[in-house]
Amino acid sequence: MLAGLSRQKDENVLVGFDTADDAGVYLLRPDCALVQTVDFFTPIVDDPFMFGAIAAANALSDVYAMGGRPLTALSIVAYPAQGDLEDLTEILRGGESKMREAGCAILGGHSVADEEIKFGYAVTGVVDPARVWTNTGARPGDALVLTKRIGTGVIATALKRGLASEEHVSASIGSMLTLNRLAAEAADGLTVHGCTDVSGFGLLGHAREMALASRATLAIETASVRFLDGAAGYARAGAVPGGLNNNREFVSGCVAVKGDLPEEIERLLYDPQTSGGLLLALPEADAAALLERCSSACRIGQVMAEGEKPLLLL
């Protein structure tokens, strides 16, 4: 679809849609560029306040993934004309709470009547043009660091099927509510060659984008990837969201597997995440510094020279 669109010729566009990066970057002046993104989705939890807050955290994540600082946001609302306005108010309050935490001002927004609820934000931030993080710069020898656990999609599906425990759901919600602000701040000042946030395409889907954009192979040590408590059991029991199967169908042709990989772990590597963590490619010394600064981060592999497949699972 995007291949059919004409390429804009504007020397101020530093990052466009060519490499499937997380946000666009537009140069304002030599020392300042805009970071712009938009994200919205249908409810992933029952509580309207939590849904709004998660949607805000998810939208903000794309700015953090570019090394930027969010400044302003515009809300996007699709809500039934006869829907409960108290619930809508709670959705907006939840979103506002996360925007306030991020220091991001909500300037307004737009709403439409729709029988299917959808909510999110268009977010604008700023970044130093000389320090933009993209998914194109991962280099052979870099370490791969992931800053959150995986499994929100599987746990949400288990919740819908009445399989998930309250404890596991609470931990998943806590992860989705956590801004990537602290992880991005922990990486500030380090040499970040590549970065993306892990969201709807799952860990392997976003790793594929980084590998292709960087013309490299990402070797992921599957035993090092951390999963949310309960996620592996739910995946083993078949609590698989539709997006997971779509991701696997799209990405699996780019994956080489070395050794045995349990089915539930493979499923989780394709699991679509909401407000997932950052995946960063850094020199080993900088990766070690990031792990010291960010307690939730873990080293999950390394970048290799471009091989037969963009992704290698070890």
Image (cartoon, rainbow, N blue to C red):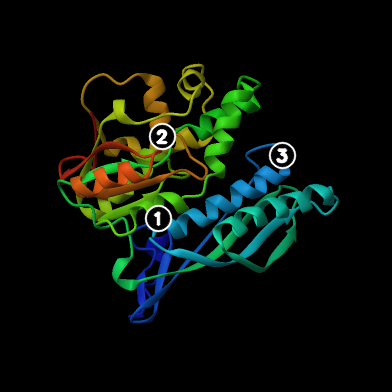
Q: Quadrant of the C terminus?
A: top left
Q: Which mark is residue 270?
A: 2
In the displayed orientation, state which residue is furthest to the front: 292
Q: Nearer the viewer, mark 2 or mark 3?
A: 3
Q: Nearer the viewer, mark 1 or mark 2?
A: 1
Q: Report the residue at 36% width, 40% height from top.
A: 297
Q: Report the residue at 31% width, 55% height from top.
A: 135
Residue 240 locus on image (x, y percent): 51, 27
Q: Identity of the amino acid at label 1?
A: Glu
Q: Quadrant of the N terminus?
A: bottom left
Dot 2: element: loop
Residue 128 locus on image (x, y percent): 36, 71
Residue receiving disc 1:
185
How many marks do you count on the picture? 3
Q: Report the residue at 34% width, 53% height from top.
A: 187
In the displayed orientation, state which residue is furthest to the bottom: 29
- Distance from Cα at disc 2 to Cα at disc 3: 26 Å
Residue 290 locus on image (x, y percent): 31, 46
145 versus 168 height, above or below = below
Q: Report the residue at 63% width, 49% height from top.
A: 53
Residue receiving disc 3:
47
Residue 305 locus on image (x, y percent): 13, 46
270 versus 276 height, above or below = above
